[in-house]
Amino acid sequence: MVRRDREHRTLTYKVDLPGGQSRLKDLVLYVSAKCRTAPRLGLIKLNKIIWRADFRAFERRGLPVSGRYYQRLKFGPAPIEMPPILAEMAQQGLLEFEITDFGFDDDGKSIKERRPIPLAKPSLQWFSSDDLVFVDESIDHYWNMTGMETSDDSHGIAWRTRSNGDPMPYESSHLSDETLDGEILAHLAEIGRERGWSSETAETWHVSKGGEARTVHTSKTSANAIDKAVKKYSNVLRRLAKK
């Protein structure tokens, strides 16, 4: 069901789960230990592993693994608390960092990896077996990737529609980066024409599965405006094709 509404639904930026911030600390230890033999594991990759597990878990079952706040950064989504947590864990002797120099990239910039090395075992008391399935799947997905490759992988529509420092709601996990085929695009364009979308009247649509609301602008003055708008916002309008 899709409904039009002038008010935005409440989005989920944080979920209070047993253990609170300790969940993120234990995830750092768990992922670092599981990835001890992985070809690469810098901080960018660490963030992406935990982000993927959290957001895929929310998309599949409506509940994340850590439940912590996320923000949009240059190299992809990351828990807002990660920098101070890593510093605190190092100070407490829970982990250390192994620096590896990988030379220079194509732009001549130095590539150095800060691999977190766990010095303590994670406490898994807060996690269900289902939680760890999502984390392990994320580790497997990124296993052979470099930090920059994991960064590129995380730059989907949820990331591209925000600016650095913006919070990322868990509902953004419902947004799809799949390309719609011509038949569905044509059907969406027809819906737009029937409903009279125009640039003079902005319409806001809420997707019932939890997708974030987007404002769709089209123009009365151009014969191709509807088609262009549908292609631009096809990720958000996908479910309208079923109406």
Image: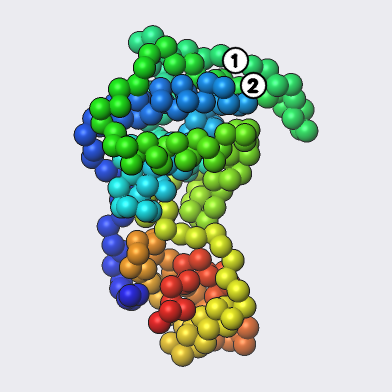
Q: What residue would you read off at disc 2?
A: 112
- The amino acid pointed to by label 1 is Ile
Q: Residue furthest bottom?
A: 194
Evaluate if marks 2 and 1 touch, with contact meaning CB atoms under 8 Å apart.
yes
Residue pictured at 46% horizontal, 59% vertical: 175
- Quarter residue 185 falls in: bottom right
Q: What numbered label is drawn on residue 176?
A: none
Upstream in sequence: badge 2 or badge 1: 1
Q: Which part of the image, by quadrant, shows the N terminus?
A: bottom left
Mark 2 element type: strand
Q: Relative to 228, is 167 above or below?
A: above
- The amino acid pointed to by label 2 is Lys
Query: Residue 57 placed where, x, y %?
Result: 37, 47
Q: Relative to 137, is 171 above or below?
A: below
Measure how far apart labels 2 and 1 are at the Cα level. 7 Å
Q: Which part of the image, by quadrant, shows the C terminus?
A: bottom left
Query: Residue 138 placed where, x, y %?
Result: 48, 39
Query: Residue 127 placed where, x, y %?
Result: 29, 33
Mark 1 element type: strand
Position of 202 with respect to 18 (left or right) is right
Along the line of sight, the residue nearer the viewer: 22 or 61: 61
Badge 1 density bin: few <14, some 14–19, many ≥20, Cα 10 Å: few
Badge 2 density bin: few <14, some 14–19, many ≥20, Cα 10 Å: some
Query: Residue 115 placed where, x, y %?
Result: 54, 20
Colouring of the image: rainbow
Q: What residue would you read off at disc 1?
A: 99
Residue pictured at 41% horizontal, 25% vertical: 30
Residue pictured at 26% horizontal, 31% vertical: 126
